[in-house]
């Protein structure tokens, strides 16, 4: 056996050892190179971040110093940082860095875009580039955005005094919760502040007890025959609310008792206790008034309620809980019946809107029923609603047929006022939170009036004339009332063509059954209006950045906004010779509108609308298609930069 080491083995060993040595050296070299590159990059990041932090300090002290250009940052020796224009940057050892400040552009939606677009005066694009030489040259570039959010100021319009200082056209300032703008103009009354504002009242002849009332502009119609010595009907001239008087009466019915009344230009209809004429049609063009016709349904009945729409009459009777329609294409003689349907109980009140009739039911299980009356000869009940455990008394339906407002008899454990969403007639829904407890008063009538207010009247005790603010349907609140010492049996309200608004009530006051109360948001109401704010000036040129609003827009209402800012005249923003206010929306033109708070567009072309500028105003455009509701502006806040 050979125990020695051959030459070949020695050479192989040397080769292996050399390979290992070279590998170790290679790894060591690569590691050293990576470390040097990492240190260079880390130093470059430090130089980059240093510029960004220094620029934040400059931004804090003087936003206007951030002009579009390329710069280096230097310390003036007193601790102040200065932006020094430079095209090449500054060199520190192996490193060179350069700062670029550029304008920012936004589209009409406020999104950042490349040009073309609108310049955002409150945002800058910041780019810092760092490069280095040496063993392994390299470079870094980082871009970010800076806004002048620091030291921003706000101008707020929210109090009654703020809004009163603006200009109203079809709008008014009210003070329900500190100061608001709503639709309405002119007049002097307020639904929520009736005080003791009974404009007029008078006594019906004899011992009449008034139980029902309806009104149109200039006329009121009262069902007054609730006892043997009273007359069943009175026609009242209300064209002058300070001098109302009875135009005429009707006394041909025996026994002279009426339960409900409906009036129009030339005719009145009373629901009576006369078995041979449950509905009497009265001709108002004759002197004295005479019976023109009647509706006498089969059976032994008492007429409970009556409503007329077009050439169709609607009525409920006590016997059989029946709802009936009758033909009014003519008024004379005995009018023929169209159709009938059985209700869940006695129908206490009818309100017809479009193809549907809404009936409050005197039942502990069903209080409101909706009937399809599009074909008067083929009536059908499309839905029934249980709201409480006592009988329904009265109902009012808004102009668009989307809300029913109903009152019930007094309940010790449940509310008496209800707001119902009737958009889907087959599936009406109680508005969540849309109820109100009237206290010890047992409601007998309701009317919803312009400005988002509901008038509730009643008997038995407590405040018998109550006004609710229902602009927030989910939380009706008491906003006023009237201390009437006797029971109130009925209410109606009229918005006159000249903008004045009044409510009319019939009461148990034996010396003054009929009373007139002035109301309205300032006495009148508009379906659209514009509120223009007072002028705001911070006293210097500024960028108006954005605005925010707090509003309430019930169903069928809306609020839109436009803003205006201009350069001042020789005497500032109060000078008559400065540029007119040009109101614009989000795209910077008068054709667009804001629907909520948003970024304010910029413009610096030197004419018309300008931002930055010094003089600022806003406009609110309030609209409604439902005169019982108004949108509400609670506050407007604009953010601007010093």
Image (tube, rainbow, N blue to C red):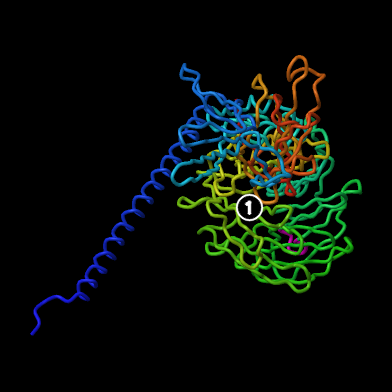
Q: Residue at x 69, y 65 (%)?
A: 301
Q: Toward the viewer: 319 or 357?
A: 357
Q: Quarter of the image holding residue 46?
A: top left
Q: Residue at x 79, y 34 (%)?
A: 244
308 over 120 or under it: above or below: below
Q: Position of residue 68 (x, y in %)?
A: 65, 32
430 over 210 or under it: above or below: below
Q: Quadrant of the C terminus?
A: top right
Span colored in magenta: 273-278
Q: Quarter of the image holding residue 332?
A: bottom right
Quick one: which residue is furthest to the right in this view? Answer: 286
Residue position marked by numbered label 1 in the rendering: 405
Q: Is residue 375 in sight in this rendering?
A: yes
Q: Position of residue 19 (x, y in %)?
A: 29, 65
Asked if the stretch drawn in magenta spans residue 276, the answer is yes
Q: Is residue 145 left or right of residue 348?
A: left
Q: Quarter of the image holding residue 103?
A: top right
């Amino acid at each position: 056996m050979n125990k020695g080491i051959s030459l070949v083995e020695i050479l192989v060993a040397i080769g292996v050892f050399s390979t290992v040595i070279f590998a170790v050296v290679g790894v060591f070299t690569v590691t050293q190179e990576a470390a040097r590159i990492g240190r260079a990059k880390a130093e470059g990041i430090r130089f980059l971040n240093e510029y960004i932090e220094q620029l934040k300090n400059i931004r804090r002290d003087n936003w206007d110093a951030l002009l579009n250009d390329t710069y280096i940052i230097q310390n003036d020796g007193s601790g102040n940082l200065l932006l020094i224009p430079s095209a090449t940057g500054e060199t520190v050892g192996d490193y060179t860095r350069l700062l670029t400040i550029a304008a920012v552009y936004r589209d009409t939606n406020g999104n950042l875009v490349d040009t073309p677009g609108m310049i955002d005066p409150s945002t800058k694009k910041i780019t810092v580039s760092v490069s280095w030489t040496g063993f392994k040259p390299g470079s870094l570039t980082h871009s970010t955005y800076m806004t002048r959010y620091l030291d921003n100021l706000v101008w707020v319009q929210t109090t009654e005094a703020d809004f009163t200082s603006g200009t109203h056209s079809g709008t008014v300032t009210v003070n329900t919760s500190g100061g608001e703008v709503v639709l309405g103009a002119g007049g002097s009354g307020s639904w929520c502040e009736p005080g003791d504002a009974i404009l007029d009242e008078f006594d019906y002849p004899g011992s009449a007890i008034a139980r029902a009332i309806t009104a149109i502009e200039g006329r009121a119609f009262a069902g007054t025959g609730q006892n043997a010595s009273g007359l069943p009907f009175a026609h009242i001239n209300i064209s002058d609310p300070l001098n109302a008087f009875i135009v005429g009466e009707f006394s041909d019915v025996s026994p002279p008792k009426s339960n409900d009344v409906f009036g129009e230009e030339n005719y009145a209809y009373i629901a009576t206790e006369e078995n041979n004429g449950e509905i009497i049609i009265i001709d108002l063009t004759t002197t004295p008034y005479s019976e023109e016709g009647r509706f006498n349904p089969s059976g032994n009945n008492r007429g409970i309620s009556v409503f007329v729409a077009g050439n169709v009459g609607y009525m409920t009777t006590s016997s059989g809980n029946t709802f009936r329609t009758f033909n009014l294409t003519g008024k004379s003689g005995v009018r023929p019946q169209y159709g009938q349907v059985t209700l869940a109980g006695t129908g206490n009140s009818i309100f017809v809107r479009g193809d549907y009739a809404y009936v409050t039911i005197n039942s502990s299980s069903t209080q409101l029923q909706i009937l399809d009356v599009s074909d008067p000869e083929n009536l059908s009940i499309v839905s029934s609603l249980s709201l409480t455990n006592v009988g329904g008394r009265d109902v009012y339906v808004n102009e668009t047929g989307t809300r029913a407002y109903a009152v019930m008899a007094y309940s010790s454990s449940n509310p008496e006022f209800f707001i119902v969403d009737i958009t889907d007639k087959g599936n009406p829904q109680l508005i969540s939170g849309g109820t109100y407890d009237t206290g010890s008063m047992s409601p007998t009538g309701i009317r919803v009036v312009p400005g988002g207010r509901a008038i509730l009247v009643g008997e038995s005790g407590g405040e018998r004339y109550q006004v609710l603010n229902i602009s927030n349907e989910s939380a009706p609140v008491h906003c006023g009332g009237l201390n009437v010492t006797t029971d109130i049996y009925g209410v109606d309200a009229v918005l006159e063509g000249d903008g004045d608004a009044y409510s009319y009530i019939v009461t148990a006051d034996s010396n003054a059954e009929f009373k007139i109360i002035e109301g309205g948001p300032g006495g009148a109401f508009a379906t659209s209006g514009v509120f223009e704010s007072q002028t705001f000036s911070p006293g210097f040129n500024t960028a108006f950045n954005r605005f925010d609003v707090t509003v309430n827009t019930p169903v069928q209402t809306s609020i839109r906004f436009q803003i205006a800012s201009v350069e001042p005249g020789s005497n500032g923003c109060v000078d008559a010779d400065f540029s007119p206010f040009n109101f614009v929306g989000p795209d910077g033109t008068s054709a667009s509108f804001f629907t909520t708070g948003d970024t304010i567009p910029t413009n610096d072309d030197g004419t018309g609308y300008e931002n930055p500028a010094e003089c600022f105003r806003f406009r609110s455009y309030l609209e409604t298609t439902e005169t019982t509701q108004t949108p509400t502006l609670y506050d407007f806040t604009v953010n601007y930069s010093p």
